Amino acid sequence: MTKKHPFLFIPGPTNVRDEVLAAQTEAMIGHRTAEFENLFAGLEDQLKQLFYTEQRVYILAASGSGMQEAAIRNGVRARVLNFVAGAFAQRWHEVARGCAKEAIKIDVEWGRAIKPETVDAALQQYGPVDAITVVHNETSTGVASPVGEIAALVREKYPDTFILVDAVSSFSGVKLPFDAWGLDVMLTSSQKALAVPPGLSFAAVSDRLLERAATIEGRGWYFDFLILEKYLKRNTTPATPAVSLMRALKVELDHIFAEGLEARFARHQALAERTRQWALDRDFTMVSEEGYHSPTVSNIRNTLALDVSDLNKFLKERGMVISNGYGSLKDVSFRVAHMGDVTMGDMERLFAYIDAYLNQNRK
C-alpha cells in the first residue's frame, strides 16, 4: 500500500500537485540537445513574465541560499548592509561574511518590517556601501517588508547602492515588479509559492549588476553571473541542470499562467486574510506587525499556550501538518502557510480540524 503523505501547510516545501510530481518521471534527455534548449527557452520566457522583467532570469540547481551567495559574489565589491529581521536575513548576513565581505548587520526586531526610514538612517550612518540586502517576505516571522518603497528611496538618494532582494517565500504569491522597482537582484527558489519540489533557484539580475560583476574578482565559477549569462544566450546552463525539476517547473508555470497572475495574487491575499481572521476570532494574535502581514505565511502567536507538537500530531492523524515557530519563536508561535496551489477549501478543512483540537482541549 502506498503511504499517504500529509497535506503540507508548512512554509516550504509546500504541497506539490500530482501532475507536477509526475513530470519528473519522464525519460531523461541530454542537456546539450535541442529538446532541452527548447525547454529552457520556454522557462526563461515564463519566468521573465513572472518576475516582471525584460532583462534576464538565471536558473540554477541550488537552494535559495545558493542564490544569496551568488548575489553577494557578483554584486558586492567590499561592503554590504544586511537588514536582519528574521532567520533568513541572518543567513544572508552569514553568507556575506563567508564570502569575506565587510558585512554590516542592521538588526530589526523580529515581527517588525524593514522600512524605508530604517534603510535611510543606516545608509546615512554606514554608507557608502556597494549594496543592501533585504528579505521581502521573512519566512520565520510572517512579515512582508515594503521593498518597492525601500527601492524608491535607495534609487533616489543612494543611486550607486545596489538593491539585492530575497523573495524566496513570496515570489509568485504577490506581484513583485523587478524592472519597475529598479532592483538589481531578486532571488527565489522552487519549493515555496511556486509549488515545485526543492532544488531549483532563480534570480532576476539587472544589466548594471552584470556590468559590476565584470569588475569583481573572486566570483567563483558555479555562481558566476558572467558565465551564466554566456550560456543563457544559448538557452542552456554551464553545469548539468536538474532536468527533471525543470520539467516539473514547466508544468507548474503553465498552470500558473492558466490561472492568471492577477487571479493567483488575489487568491493568495484572500487566503492570508482568511487565516488572520480565523486566528483573531479564536483569541490568537499575529507575530507580524499590522500592515505588513505576509501574503503567503501567517505566523500566529500562541497566546492560548497550545502544545504545538501535540496539535501537529492530531493534525497528522487527519492528513495535514502545520509548522512550529522558527528559532526563538518555537512554541511561542506556529506558522500556517497558504501559498502555492492551496485553495480556500483546503484552508477551511485545516481550520475545522484545529477548531476540533481546540474544543477537545477545552473540556
Image (spheres, rainbow, N blue to C red):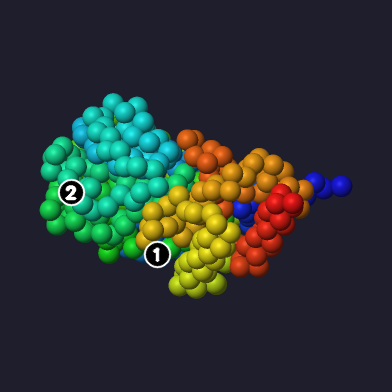
SS assignment at label 1: loop
Residue 175 - label: 1
Q: Residues within 10 Å of mark 2 (few under 14, many from 20)?
A: some
Q: Looking at the image, which residue is at 21% across and 52% down?
A: 117
Task: Name the residue at 49% across, 57% down.
Answer: 296
Looking at the image, which is closer to me, 204 or 147?
147
Q: Position of residue 260 (x, y in %)?
A: 50, 73
Q: What residue is disc 2 on?
A: 120
Pointer 2 with pointer 1, Cβ within 8 A: no
Provide residue 15's location: percent of width, then percent of height: 63, 54
What's the CA distance linking mark 2 and mark 1?
A: 24 Å
Tell me the mark number nearer the camera, choosing from 2 and 1: 2
Q: Residue at x 65, y 60 (%)?
A: 351
User: In the image, what residue occupies the spot 51% across and 48% down?
Assistant: 301
Q: Is residue 121 above or below residue 102?
A: below
Q: Is residue 89 above or below residue 183?
A: above
Determine if residue 79 is in view: yes
Q: Position of residue 164 (x, y in %)?
A: 30, 47
What kind of residue is marked 1?
Answer: Lys
Q: Does residue 108 appear to the left or right of 58 in the view shown?
A: left
What is the number of the mark on residue 326? Answer: none
Q: Amino acid at mark 2?
A: Asp
Can residue 228 be seen here? The reply is no
Tally the numbered discs. Answer: 2
Nearer to me, 57 or 140: 140
Residue 257 relative to residue 162: left or right? right
Residue 11 versus residue 199: which sits nearer the camera? 11
Which type of secondary structure does the marked residue at label 2 adopt?
helix
**Relative to 73, is 347 on the left or the right?**
right
Query: Please, which residue is most extreme toward the right here?
Result: 1
Which is more N-terminal, label 1 or label 2?
A: 2
Q: Residues within 10 Å of mark 1 (few under 14, many from 20)?
A: some
